[in-house]
Structure formats: C-alpha cells, structure tokens
Amino acid sequence: MTAATASVGRLDLRRIAVSIAAPALAILFSLVVTGLILVSTGDPVWSTLQQVWEYGKQPRVIALSINQGITYYLSALAVAIGFRMNLFNIGVDGQYRLAAFSAAVVGGSFSLPKPLHIAIIVAVAMLVGAMWAGIAAALKATRGVSEVISTIMLNAIATSLIAFLLGKVAVDVAGSNNVGTEPIDESGAFPGIPLIPDSELDVYGFLIVAIAAGVAYSVVLGRTRFGFDLRATGRSEPAAVASGVSVKRMVVISMLLSGAVAGLVGMPQLLGGDSRTYSLDFPAGLGFTGIAIALLGRNNAVGMAFSALLFSFLDASSIILDINDISKEIVLIMQGTIVLSVVIAYELVRRYSIVAEQRRVSRELAAEREARPEGVSA
Amino acid sequence: MHAIVGENGAGKSTLMKILYGMQRPDEGTIAVDGREVTFHSPSDAIDAGVGMVHQHFMLADNLTVLENVVLGSEPTKGGWIDFGAAKARIKEIAETYGMDVEPDTLVEDLGVGERQRVEILKVLYRGARILILDEPTAVLVPQEVDELFDNLRELKEEGLTILFISHKLDEVLQVADEITVIRRGTTVDTVDPASVTARQLAELMVGSELPTPETRESTVTDVPVLEVEGLSIRPAQGRPVLEDISFTIHRGEVLGIAGVEGNGQAELVEAIMGMRTATEGRIQLGDTDMSSWSTRSRREAGIAYIPEDRQRHGMLLDAPLWENRMLGHQTEKPNVKGVWIDRANARKDTERIIREYDVRTPGIDVLAASLSGGNQQKLIVGREMSGEPKVLIAAHPTRGVDVGAQAAIWEHIRAARRAGLAVLLISADLDELIGLSDSLKVILRGRVVADVDPSTVTPEDLGSAMTGAGEAT
C-alpha cells in the first residue's frame, strides 16, 4: 500500500514538472528568437530586454498589466470552455464586442441604484454574448455547420452590425471627435481596487469577477457531472456518445456558456474605465488574444491566469520600446513565437509522457511480479 | 512458420513492434539471416526484408487493390507512376504465391479475407522475406481461415519465413512448425506443435489450469427482459442495414448473434443502445417501451454495454482509469452525488474493479492508454458489470484478450447470468458463442437467417450458416 501511495505522489510531481516544462521552454525559445531578431535589426539585445523589465515593474505599469490581464483572462476562459470539448469558438471577438455595445446602450438608457444597475448591464452583456454564440451553436447542432467558419463570419457580421447601430445611437464623446454610446451613469461604475501600492491607477474591481469565473470554470469542469460530460466529449466524441452524452446538446450548452463568458470580456473596460461608453476606440481583437492565452495556459484556470498576465505585461511594458525608437512589434513577435512553440512543445511533451508512462507501468508491473512471485499473489 | 502465443500484456505486441522497428529495444539484438541488425523505423525493417501485416487493416477503401499495394513505394517512370509495371509485378507475385486477387477492384468491394490478402500482397510487393502476421485470424470465419492457411503454406514453400501471432491455439497447432510461448515479457518455452495439445499450450501461456466456455446448466427463466420487435434500419439509399429483427431475451438468458462482421451486428447494438435511430421497430425493456429513449436513459435503466471497439467507444484513452470507470455511468452511484462528481467513491470503486477483475496496473491514476488492450477490456467489463445491470449488450467481450482474462470474463458473465442478467452476445469467436449462449441467431445481410441450438451445432455448421453457404440446403 505504501508503495502505491508513493508512486501516486511521484506521478503527480512528474506531471506538474512536465506541464511546466513545456511553457517554460516555449518562453525561453521565444526569448532566443526575439534576441536574434533584435541582433538582425541592429538593436542591443540585453539593454532592450532590460528596458522592458525596468519599465514594466513600475507600479503604474503593473496596475495597467493587471487590468489588461483581467480582460485577457476572461477572453481565454471563454475560448477554453469551447476548447475543452474540441469546439473552436473563434467568435469570442464578435461576441464580446456586440455584448459590450448592447450592454452600453442598455446601461446608458436608464439609471438605477448601483448594484442593480451593474447587475443588469452585466446580465445583458452575458445574454447577448450567449445569443451571438448561440447562432453558431444552432447552426452546428441542426445543420452541422463548422463552428470555426460560422463564428469567423459572425465576427465580421458583428463588426458591421455594431458600426451600423452605433451610427443610430451615437453621441459625441466629450472632448474629442470620437463617437460612442450614451455614457453610463455613475451608478453603473464598478469600483476599482487600490491593489498596487504607489500606483495612482486602481485595478479594475472586475478582478473579483474574473477570479470567481476562473474558480467556477475549474469547479464546473473538474467536479461536476456536466463537466465530465463536456470533457469526455472533448477527449473522444464516439466514447462520449456511447456513454450517453448527447453531443448536440453539449455543443449548444457549451457554446452558450462560452458566449456568456465572452460577454464579460468587455465589462472591465466598460464599467471600470472613466468614460463608460462603447466608442469607436473600444478595444477590439481581445477574442483572438484569448485563443493564444488559452493555448499557452492549456485551458487550465491557473495556467491561463499566468499566461494572461504574461501577455498583458509584455503589452504594457512594450510602450517603452516605441519611446526609445525600437519597434514595439518585437513584442508581438515574441508573443507569436511563444504560442507557436508552446503548441509544438505541448504535443511533444504529451507524446513523450504517454510513452514514458507506458514504460513506467510495465516496469512497475514487472517489479511487482519479482517482489511477489507467482502463486503467492493475493 | 513460427508462431508466437501468449497472454495479452505478455509482450507479444511489443515484441512485434520491436521486430518491425516501431519501437527500440532497451537491450538485446535482432539478427536477420545471421546478420545483426538495428531497426530505427519500419522502413529499416522493410529494407531488411521484414514485413508486417497488422491486425487492423491499413488500407484505403476508396483506392483499388493496385493503388493500395503500391502506396508508399510507387514505381516511377519519368516522374509518373508506372502503373503498368506495378500491375505486372503484382500479378507475378500473386501467381507465384497462389493468391487470387484482382488488382483493379476497389478495396471497399472486398471481403475481409480478400482485404487481408491485399495486406499480405502489399508486404510481399515491398520485397519482404519475413512476414509478421498479428492475429491474422481474429476477423475471419473458419472457411476464410482455411484459405489464409493455404496461402501461408504456399508462401512457406516459396521459402518465406512467417511469424504468426495468435490467441487461437488450435489454429497455431494446425499451421506452425514451431511455437514460442511468452508470458509476462519473457519466453516461457519453445515447443514442437506435434508434441503438445492445445490445452498444454494454453497452460504454458497462462501458467495455470484452464477454463472452458461451457455453461450447460440452464438458468433461463420465462421473464422477458429485453424484447426487440420488427427492428429495421433502412438508409435512404442502398440496401437495408437491418430488416425486421425480432427477439426476446429472458432473465438469465444469453442470446448469441453469430455473423460475419459487417452484416448488421454493429448497427443492431447501436440501435438497442439508442446511438442510432431505427427506421421502424420497437425495443422494450421489461414492460416499458424504450424505443424513443436517449442512450443515457437506457443506460440508467440498467442496460450495460461492452462496445465492439473499446478504444473508440469504451475508453477515454488520455484520461486516468478512475475517470474511465465513470464513463457511461457518470449519472449513477457511486460516481456522483447530485450534480457533483464523487471522487472519493468513484476512486474507491475503481480500486474494487481492479482487484476483482484483475486489471494489471500500478494504480488508478495512470492513463488508460498505458494499459494493454486486455487490461483495458477487463476494466470495461468490470465497469459494465457494476451497479447490477438488467441487460448486458456485449459486443466481442473477449476480443484481443488473453486466455486467462477471457476465462475470467466468461466466469463473470456466467455468474451474472445466474443472478438473472439477460445478455445479448455478439462475437466473432464461434467457440465463445456456442459455449456461452442459451440460444443463437445467425445474422446475414441484416436479416436473421437461422435459429441454431448451441448445444448441438458445430463451429463448422455455424460458419457455413454465417456465410450463407447453408442457404441452398
């Protein structure tokens, strides 16, 4: 019995080591690639990286990173729900933009006591996000349309739809030639948290929602019947069907969930920012960053939190590069290399660990046999 | 012709993989024609004249025999594939070894036996002098087995060496010139087939006394448990997959379905499990009509299911064993409490299954992929027998399982039958069908063509009924 317990302990350690090795290698590799590119463009490698680091560790920039990280994380969660059952929700981008726009319009049209006002805005966002994703889900479940294609097209449609609707409801944003929705009243503002000492910038209060969403994601997937069905479908659809999972139903539910979480992506900015309006310069493309982060974080709630922070840190601290006349696109290259190499690294590690485990199992079985000669067995 | 026999998990497949260069040995040497060789990949093995015929055919259905054979080593002339030369070569090989194959037919139109011949041809085409056959008879009916053996004898006469892996000991005894028995990774003995009986051989393999699939004392009651009536599946185009299938299985009864694979058995099982919609017909469990139920409701109502293809339908290969124990029972105790997974109890119950069904594994946290096929199957059987099912749908419950585990699985089925389980047994192993079943039906092209009494029928008779040879008489 002790031997069995020990082997379980060793196993877990090994798994953890293996799962950290891949992203660590990928990040290292991307640093090398970035270095090579810097050398080829004639920029000093070491001092560039140092600049990024020095700039990035200022309290204000850290707060900025965390704020950006919150939206990245929510976006990654939305993508990961789909990933866990082999659904590629490329449409998080359209879903969150349409959701944020709708929530901004609804939230700007009336005023209520604070918690209620916020709750309604968030609910509208989740609902709209889920509905937009639901279109792709319905198409897949009823007509077998690939969700990859439909969500990409829905992204394009969302862009045009928002532009069209914004034209109908837009008001001028004070002090600029930007246009946006009617600003949401103060009662809709999500209070910030002064998390970072010495920083005049508060962290979005939505941090709490993001953490709660991450915990819920972990618990629902790992600990509930529903989560088991979802993961089973992702691992092997035929096996899931044979076990009694209705795949169509799972497709619809998980797409709706993914869309609802996507609806949250725009909320930190909308409710935690100063302007509380959906304007022309509302951040776009977060849905795609979410895909990269979900890949890097391996759809794991904690892993994705780290990768969201890594990405947002790189984004926030890259501003210094522009100031110092180094193209800040170097950070994009770095992020791209990380994702590309991590996907390869995970696959290599996966194959390696399956083979290693098969070997280990046969070795342990052999050892057990020697220790317990035949006939004496229990 | 050398045969290798051994239990599942004894290391036969691993040995074959090493010989074919798919896996590297930690120690030891391989010599071909007295010359020591190291294989880094299957192509090294092919270069050395070693060819492998896999248990599962690796053929492209939508290509012709000719195209399949040359695939991967196409003869070229000025950059174009020289089909003329290839065809001539195939004809020549086919004639030399007495193998009757038409190069221009599509593989999808071929039967199982013919497909296997194409596989062998493919290997010969690449110049193999040593043939490795992995469980070649698993998918064949007796008549086809005889044909295969004729082919193999012919190959042997032409001077080829054949390495033959099988579970079916009487077949091994019939064709092999020498038999090596391996058990748990080591060679137990090399014997002369003339001097051993199948029973002695099996005992060498298992290392203990042997079982038979006999279940003569009847436990059949007159309480119907599963009734299927007029079940038909007719695709929009083409011929019906199932046509008017009706049967009743009573408490304590095993109903066997015999038939060559691909005659509607898989569809029948899927229709009963609710994974495939029947065009018409009624499926009734006890007194309730469950024709319109979902797969999950059927499973919850007490239908256990051992799927034909365990890796595709029965397992999550990259999930740990205890999660696999839940699969198919993820709404039932002890796996869940309300909407929550009950980890502690699911894990404890997995331990129980591993103990009772002798699943050889170092723990319940290893991935299902790390277990050998036989041990995976034992876990599935253990899982499906848990929770006191009313009906067991068992498709090839002992396929690819070693003699020892086979006996254990039979014993479990028999015990459950005594306790009142109704079993629908589908198998390609005719001895298993005859030995376990209380009644037998033969299925051919989606229809039941014969009812057979398992206590009087011989495997040969059953085989001819399955191929339709008996239809004329």
Image: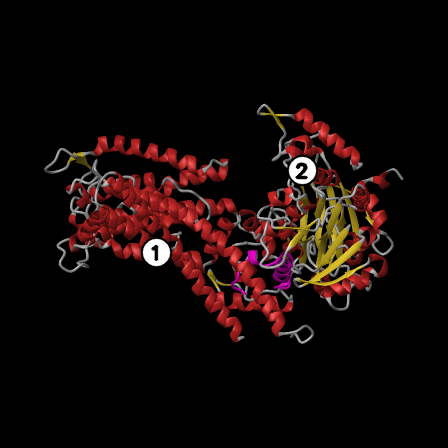
Tell me which amino acid carries mark 1. Answer: Gly
For residue B378: magenta? Answer: yes
Q: Main secondary structure of the magenta part?
A: helix
**Residue A327 in the image: above or below residue A53:** above
Report helix, strand or loop for mark 2.
Answer: loop
Residue placed most toward the observer, A251 or A149: A149
Q: Chain of mark 2?
A: B
- Crowdedness near tag 1: few (<14), some (14–19) or many (≥20) residues, C-alpha within 10 Å: many
The number of numbered badges drawn on the structure is 2
Which residues lie in the magenta part?
B364-388
For the C terminus of chain B, the image quarter is: top right
Residue B375 percent across, percent down from the top left: 63, 60
Color encoding of the figure: secondary structure
* Direction from residue B68 to residue B331 in the image, left or right: left
Q: Chain of mark 1?
A: A
> In the picture, residue B76 is in which quadrant?
top right
Q: Residue furthest front?
A: B35
Give the residue displayed 34% in from the left and 32% down from the top.
A157
Tell me which amino acid carries mark 2. Answer: Arg
Give the residue displayed 57% in from the left and 53% down from the top.
A243
**Residue B346 in the image: above or below residue A71:** below
Give the residue displayed 50% in from the left and 35% down from the top.
A143
Q: Residue furthest right?
A: B473
Residue A84 is labelled as none
> In the picture, residue A370 is in which quadrant?
bottom right
Residue B455 percent across, percent down from the top left: 85, 56
> Mark 1 highlights which residue?
A214
